[in-house]
Image: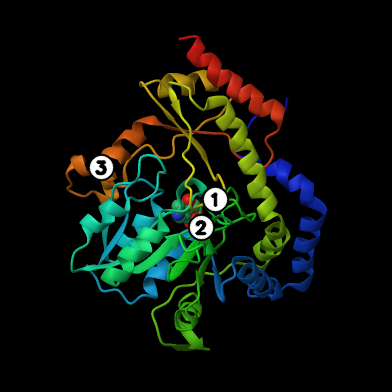
Amino acid sequence: MRKIQMVDLQSQYYKIKPEVDNAMLNVLDSAAFINGPEVKLFQKELEDYLQIPHVIPCANGTDALQIALMALDLKPGDEVITADFTFAATVEVIHLLGLKAVLVDVNYDTFTIDPEQIRKAITPRTRAIIPVHLFGQCADMEEILEIAKVHQLHVIEDNAQAIGAEYTFSDGTVKKSGTMGVLGTTSFFPSKNLGCYGDGGAVFTSDDALAHKIRGIVNHGMYERYYHDEVGVNSRLDSIQAAVLRKKLPNLDLYNEARRKAADFYDEAFSGHSDLLIPVRSSQSTHVFHQYTLRIKNQRRGALQEYLQEHDIPSMIYYPVALRKQKAYFQQSDDKDFESTDKLLGEVLSLPMHTELDEEQLKYITDTVLEFFKGE
Ligand SMILES: *Cc1c(COP(=O)(O)O)cnc(C)c1O
């Protein structure tokens, strides 16, 4: 059996190595390292895939979030609501821009931001909501967009973990994740569902004026060379990464399908187990399983993780600390409002999840997990 890894980028690369190598070498030959034709072509191809008029590539997913917020002309102290249970980048950029992060609890079953808690957190200073499509499944966008409409708030979707997922509204409309809010952002970090071989990210929007503004922001606020109309940043996707992404984008749906098949295998083995809760799949969103995250009951998580490690099976805790408790973003808050987050911090365990898991590996992983509980 091949060694089991949390993410196996090497095996995936070997399957597309000749075409990716060739694409990278072509960029070297052309020497168009920055803003070369590959970047433009990738942008177009991603716009087609997402069915959205504007994709603006940038340097990474964290920049994408920062740039999205910069485009909205928020004032210092304006409040942005986001989830307490997610990767820190979302909250980090809010703080960087002098805005106020208002963290709210997530839904215990779906791990995504709880619309009821958003409603409770709205004040006259609230300007935006950033739902995170955590672990590969869309947040409850129908309700979030409704709240945003009533209170006139911007919605920025952090789509770093869910590219390729689809959301079905109750009127039957289907949209790709990241294209429902006024802005969507993503990351092409190597381990993401659509990853490059370095750093990369993008902002999506249907709004022509915002797209124009963002194209300037990513380029030092320049709309005409050496005329700076905005305080911008320097945030670019380089041509080599764009060339890699152009080879991987046509496989994205297959990659997501491979993840889903691995998740189905896990689900089948674990469903109904008294010590385990499998990820709950929303009826409105497809799941692209950036992570396969179990909730381990009865305080058995630590022992299970150790047992897995002894059997050469990696596992990870995403995430061990609530953002409101992080030193950098500490908020005085009442723990009673964060029941789900606080429970999840003690229960979540993510198993190996990538496109290259084979049945032998999956069987070994599920057998080992089940053996652990039998041995109790
Ligand atoms: C990975 C990730 C980011 C940041 O992306 P980078 O490209 O690493 O900057 C932001 N939000 C979420 C939810 C992520 O998973």
Instruction: Name, please, the residue furthest toward the top.
Output: 375
Which disc, if any, is residue 338?
A: 3
At 40% from the left and 54% from the top, the residue drawn is: 140
25 displayed left or right of 39:
right
372 displayed left or right of 15:
left
The answer to whether residue 36 of the structure is visible from this angle is yes
How many numbered discs sit on the rendered protein?
3
- Disc 1: which residue: 286
The kind of secondary structure element at disc 3 is helix
Residue 127 falls in image quadrant: bottom left
Look at the numbered discs 1 and 2 and tell me whether their residues touch, using CB distance below 8 Å.
yes
315 displayed left or right of 104:
right
- How far separated are the C-alphas under marks 1 and 3? 26 Å
- How far separated are the C-alphas under marks 3 and 2? 26 Å
Which amino acid lies under the numbered mark 3 shown in the image of this protein?
Answer: Phe
Q: Indicate if the residue with disc 1 has its beta carbon within 8 Å of ligand 1.
A: no
At 17% from the left and 43% from the top, the residue drawn is: 334
- Disc 2: which residue: 167
The kind of secondary structure element at disc 1 is loop
The kind of secondary structure element at disc 2 is strand
Which amino acid lies under the numbered mark 2 shown in the image of this protein?
Answer: Tyr
